[in-house]
């Protein structure tokens, strides 16, 4: 028995020493963070008031312009956001957001509201509270009355081709909400990230249907917004 035990120990040590170390992929490449990176998106934004639609089309440029080390030892990056009506115009300042990556979360501050955009490592079916660090978790929303909004990871590793012709071999989709009610309205929001690139597509459909007796159940939009943001180019 002692001899057999020694043989097993030698065998295990031989196997462990001969194999290459396993490198774990935590998925951080789905949102690269480095000063100087920039993305240009085409945006189509439609506002609806009592069934009257107003649509704006413009470009949005997002640039990582600076970084600083937080008290927790994590680097936070400033996101400069600029817009222009088309390529013939100069970029105009819109606002500045910030983003940071912890060991297991991608956290982004958007107009002073903090969201958990991604969790690491990503896997299809994983859920988390996107409102973990903001007051929206307390206030809820008109559609489901729940402030704790649980995001869902879907299609991790899937290939996608965008309308502007780019193809990305490895992407993931973060579904923020997929609510729809024939009487109340709909709240459908999701974002798509590509490995080595970051955010490549974002879509928002938030519609409130008319609820008066004259139009109840007819799905006439009383107010709402439809927003589509598609990557056109990125610079490293």
Image (tube, rainbow, N blue to C red):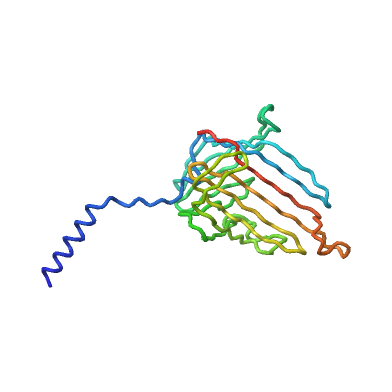
Q: Is residue 105 left or right of residue 44?
A: left
Q: How many marks?
A: 0
Rendered location of residue 175, percent (x, y): 59, 56
Q: Outermost residue toward the left?
A: 3
Q: Residue at x 52, y 40 (%)?
A: 77
Examine the image and state in which quarter residue 121 appears: bottom left
Q: Position of residue 32 (x, y in %)?
A: 49, 42
119 versus 217 height, above or below: above
Q: Nearer the viewer, residue 159 or 145?
A: 159
Q: Is residue 209 above or below residue 27?
A: below
Give the residue at the far right of this rendering.
214
Work out whether residue 50 or residue 148 is closer to the camera in this orientation and state it: 50
Q: Quadrant of the N terminus?
A: bottom left
Q: Position of residue 145 (x, y in %)?
A: 69, 64
- In this picture, residue 69 sits left or right of residue 177: left
User: Is 28 on the left-hand or right-hand side of 91?
Assistant: left
Which residue is at the front of the view, 209 or 138? Answer: 209
Instruction: Identify the residue at horizontal 45%, vertical 50% (top origin).
Output: 27
| Residue at 71% across, 54% down | 206
**Horizontal relation, residue 91 to residue 14: left or right:** right
- Residue 141, relative to residue 72: is it above or below? below
Taking the spot 19% from the left edge, 56% from the top edge, the residue there is 14
Q: Is 206 drawn above or below residue 40 in the view shown?
A: below
Within the image, what quadrant is residue 185 found in? Answer: bottom right
């Amino acid at each position: 028995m002692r001899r057999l035990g020694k043989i097993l120990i030698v065998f295990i040590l031989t196997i462990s020493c001969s194999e290459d170390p396993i490198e774990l992929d935590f998925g951080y490449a789905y949102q690269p963070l480095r000063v100087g990176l920039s993305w240009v998106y085409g945006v189509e934004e439609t506002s609806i008031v009592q069934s009257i639609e107003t649509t704006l089309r413009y470009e949005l440029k997002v640039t990582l312009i600076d970084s600083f080390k937080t008290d927790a030892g994590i680097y936070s990056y400033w996101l400069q956001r600029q817009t222009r009506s088309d390529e013939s115009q100069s970029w105009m300042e819109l606002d500045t957001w910030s983003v940071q990556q912890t060991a297991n979360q991608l956290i982004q501050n958007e107009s002073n509201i903090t969201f958990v955009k991604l969790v690491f490592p990503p896997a299809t079916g994983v859920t988390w509270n996107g409102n973990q660090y903001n007051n929206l978790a307390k206030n809820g929303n008109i559609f489901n009355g729940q402030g704790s909004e649980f995001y869902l990871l879907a299609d991790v590793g899937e290939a996608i081709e965008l309308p502007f012709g780019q193809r990305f071999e490895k992407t993931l989709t973060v579904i923020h909400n997929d609510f729809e009610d024939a009487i109340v309205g709909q709240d459908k929001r999701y974002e798509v990230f590509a490995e080595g690139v970051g955010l490549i597509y974002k879509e928002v459909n938030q519609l409130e249907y008319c609820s008066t007796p004259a139009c109840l159940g007819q799905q006439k939009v009383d107010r709402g917004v439809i927003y589509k943001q598609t990557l056109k180019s990125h610079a490293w």
